[in-house]
Amino acid sequence: MNWADYTILAVLALSVLIGFWRGFVAEVFALACWVLAFWLAWMFGPVLAERFFDSISVPSARVLLAYALCFVAVLIGGALVGFVLRKLVSGSGLSGTDRLLGMVFGLARGVALVVLVVLLLGFTPFTRDPWWNTSQLLPSFRQAAGWVTDRLPAHVAGYLAPAAALVAPVADLPVAPRTDAAPKPPEPQP
């Protein structure tokens, strides 16, 4: 195992521990709040930006502030509701089950995060580095990244065409000729 494997294991372990600490209800609710925050910012950010027309003269600053305010307001409201939900679950006697399911959710989140990072790293020269090719855990995550890419809508998958190389086994990767080798001496002429 190399440092990439240890990093993957650390990400998975940390995500599982956070899931255990927060519990399933809090984890799912937090994820729902993030999705809702992105959606509401997308939908109402432009409307709010128009309200700042007189006070902020730079259009990009107006839009950025509007999106940020919508996003942060939803996250703060979600955090308050999430706090109440955690208190309700802890007082209900289901906290053990909640924590166990939180660990499972944390593992799934950790796997999804590693797959996303591997997918994005597929666009970089890191795929030619020895640590990438000698990792024991990365081949499974490369295969998962390829699986995700295959199931994306066609218009999205077109942007991710280079990610298809992530599924190729290490033995099938092309090896570039060495450029640092000493040149061969000319052969004597008969």
Image: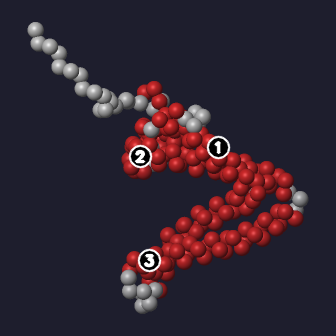
Image coords of residue 112 (percent x, y)? 59, 48
Assign a secondary structure to mark 1.
helix
For residue 85, above or below residue 125: below
The quarter in which the C terminus is drawn is top left
What numbered label is drawn on residue 63? Answer: 3
Q: Do labels 3 and 1 touch, CB within 8 Å?
A: no
**Dot 3 lies on which element?**
helix
In the rendered view, how is the structure colored?
secondary structure
The reply to whether callout 2 and callout 1 are in contact (CB within 8 Å) is: no
Residue 109: tell me if it is visible.
yes
Horizontally, is 86 left or right of 32 in the view?
Answer: right
At 60% from the left and 76% from the top, the residue drawn is: 73
Mark 3 → mark 1, Cα distance in angstroms: 39 Å
The residue pinned by badge 2 equals: 124
* Residue 11, horizontal then vertical, whole percent: 63, 49
- Residue name at image x 48 percent, y 78 percent: 65
> Few, some or many C-alpha atoms within 10 Å of disc 1 (few <14, some 14-19, many ≥20)?
some
Choose the circle earlier in sequence order: 3 or 1.
1
**Residue type, mark 1 in image:** Leu
Residue 32 horizontal side relative to residue 142, left or right: right
Mark 2–mark 3 CB contact (< 8 Å): no
Find residue 9 and name its label: 1
79 on left or right of 144? right
Q: Residue furthest top?
A: 190
Structural crowding at the residue carrying mark 3, measured as other residues with C-alpha within 10 Å and reported as few (<14), some (14–19) or many (≥20): many
Residue at (60% x, 64% y) in the render: 34
Residue 87 in the image: state x and y as whole percent: 82, 67
Q: CA distance from mark 2 to mark 3?
A: 31 Å
Q: Amino acid at mark 3?
A: Val
Which of these two is toward me, 77 or 188? 188
